[in-house]
Image (spheres, rainbow, N blue to C red):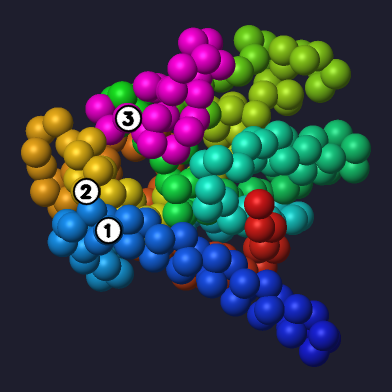
Amino acid sequence: MSESVRHNRGRITRRAALRGAAVAGATIAAGLGAGSRPPIVQAQWRAANDVQASYEAAISRPARHYQVVAYDDVGHLGLGEHVVNSLNASQFSYEEGPDGLLVAVQLYGTGDVLAFNDHLWDKYQLGAKYAVNDPRTKAPATRNIFYPRATSGGPELPPTDRQSLWMDPSIEALQARGVLFLVCHNALVGIAGQAVADGRNPDNLTTAQVADEMMANLVPGVFPVPAGVFELQRLQDRDFRLLVY
């Protein structure tokens, strides 16, 4: 690898890390502004051995190309569409097949809420908090609108069919195509602390208890990691190419 390439990759990594740190800091600061005790940074958290082994196997899957997409803002729409474009270019335009590209999406900052199930979206008023409206009701979302299938067809349909699996930007459809979704535990704790500070806490739980509930109510198939900003570096060290969205 040339020195110029090494320098550029290092520069992009620092940029991603700084963006993530700023978002996480803003999340925690919001809790401070409300007079609550700040959430404790939990960099010491680690996944259970079986979960970590499953994750390591998933990111080690053979492919011709590897991408990691950094996503830190739930208000920045279009994530799924961008991933679909990458997958379809590899699979159909370049005829590399369904295993030509392995994509991991690192959720962090407010992007973490894409990994929360309907129960959490309803209970903690995530749609109202993060200005996400449900396209069905036009009101603040009380369900995870990013997870369920958006099209009705399967892989038997051609990619030109708008109802095919190949045109579906939902998390559920992308997971069916092998895309990995990673959720940052540190950002999750910040989101839990903000819910407590804002009064979006109907059971009067502590930040730690809300964080535990959030960890127990992730959508199927996502992988929690200790710190998204470090996981971005770790994946780049394993030849994943970084895309900041």
Q: Does the magenta stretch include residue 129?
A: yes
Q: Which of marks 3 and 1 is nearer the N terminus?
A: 1
Q: Nearer the viewer, mark 3 or mark 1?
A: 1
In the picture of the structure, the residue carrying the numbered disc 2 is 197
Give, as a three-letter code, the residue at label 3.
Answer: Gln
Percent position of residue 83, x then y? 69, 41
Magenta-drawn stretch, dominant element (helix, strand or loop): loop
In the picture of the structure, the residue carrying the numbered disc 3 is 125
Query: Could you tell me which residue is drawn at 52 percent across and 15 percent down?
Result: 138
Q: In this view, does 14 lie above or below 212?
A: below
Which secondary structure, mark 1? helix
| Highlighted range, magenta | 123-143
In the picture of the structure, the residue carrying the numbered disc 1 is 33
State if disc 1 and disc 2 touch (CB < 8 Å): yes
Percent position of residue 154, x then y? 66, 15
Which secondary structure, mark 3? loop
